[in-house]
């Protein structure tokens, strides 16, 4: 069906509702999702306590003692009519250094074998793409991104690993993600970035945001170690372009 003619409002318990824009993953559905979240924040919609964007829908938490279901849905429906990509502020582009292969990218050679390319070609193709962040979730700061070459499409691991190191730059299906903390994972690890995606000691602990663009810059192990040391001391910030 694609984009719905009218968004769907679905109850999620007694403290939240989901606003669904489509039954498929697309940039348009995601842009509408992010635009609705932005409008809710800008207008400080009464009763709304938190919003959580996904690929194609927005989860809206609310206080039922302040905003009843009917009134909230009416307000959200009105905002949905304005929720278009053009209402969003210009997207940021975040450059992340990444060291491919070796002990940091321990699945690179296996991926190369699976897709019929050399490890160097896999790394080059991966680093040459412009990635779009659909949303951040699963663990704090972990981005779900698309944009890589179709030549790198690969099924997720049949047996997910128990532990994946933080900073692991990984692929699975048509998606790319970066593990923000050590966690289980079913994506193939191509490399690692020394940049911290989640830093609870920082005033802004989550680096990436839904709607961002991400570019990877290939680095060697020596530069990786230098950036990692600087990041640990709070002396490194990635390059962020803001129009």
Image: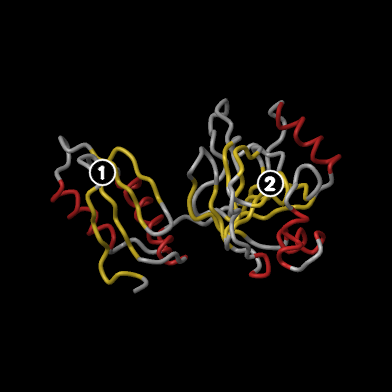
Residue pictured at 79% horizontal, 40% vertical: 224
Seen from the viewer's position, the closer of residues 11 and 46 is: 11
State if disc 1 and disc 2 touch (CB < 8 Å): no
Within 10 angstroms of label 2, few (less than 14), some, or many (20 or more) residues? few
Residue pictured at 62% horizontal, 54% vertical: 214
The answer to whether residue 33 is left or right of residue 180 is left
When the figure is inspected, residue 2 is found, relative to residue 52, above or below; the finding is: below
Residue pictured at 71% horizontal, 26% vertical: 233
The answer to whether residue 63 is left or right of residue 23 is left
Mark 2 — residue? 239
Secondary element at image label 2? strand
- In this picture the colour scheme is secondary structure
Seen from the viewer's position, the closer of residues 238 and 165 is: 165
Which is more N-terminal, label 1 or label 2?
1
Seen from the viewer's position, the closer of residues 162 and 153 is: 162
Secondary element at image label 1? strand
Instruction: Residue lying at the far front in this picture: please name it.
Output: 159
When the figure is inspected, residue 156 is found, relative to residue 220, above or below; the finding is: below
Mark 1 — residue? 16
Residue pictured at 57% horizontal, 35% vertical: 198
Instruction: Residue lying at the far bottom in this picture: please name it.
Output: 1
């Amino acid at each position: 069906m694609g984009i719905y003619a009218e968004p769907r409002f679905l109850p999620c318990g007694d403290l939240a509702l989901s606003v669904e824009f489509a039954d498929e993953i697309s940039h348009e559905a995601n842009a509408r999702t992010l635009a609705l979240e932005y409008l809710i924040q800008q207008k400080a919609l009464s009763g709304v306590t938190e919003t959580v964007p996904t690929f194609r829908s927005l989860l809206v938490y609310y206080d039922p003692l302040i905003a009843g279901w009917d009134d909230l849905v009416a307000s959200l429906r009105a905002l949905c009519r304005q929720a278009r990509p053009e209402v969003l502020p210009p997207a940021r582009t975040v450059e992340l250094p990444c060291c491919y292969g070796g002990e940091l990218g321990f699945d690179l050679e296996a991926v190369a074998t699976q897709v019929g390319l050399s490890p160097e070609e896999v790394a080059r193709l991966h680093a040459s793409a412009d990635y779009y962040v659909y949303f951040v979730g699963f663990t704090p700061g972990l981005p779900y991104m698309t944009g890589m070459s179709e030549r790198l499409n690969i099924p997720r691991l049949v047996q997910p690993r128990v532990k994946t190191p933080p900073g692991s730059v990984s692929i699975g299906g048509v998606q790319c993600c970066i593990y923000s903390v050590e966690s289980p994972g079913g994506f193939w690890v191509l490399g690692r970035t020394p940049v911290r995606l989640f830093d609870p000691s920082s005033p802004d602990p989550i680096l990436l945001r839904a709607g961002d663009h991400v570019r990877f810059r290939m680095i060697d192990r020596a530069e990786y170690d230098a950036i990692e040391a600087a990041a640990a001391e709070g002396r490194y910030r990635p390059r962020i372009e803001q129009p």
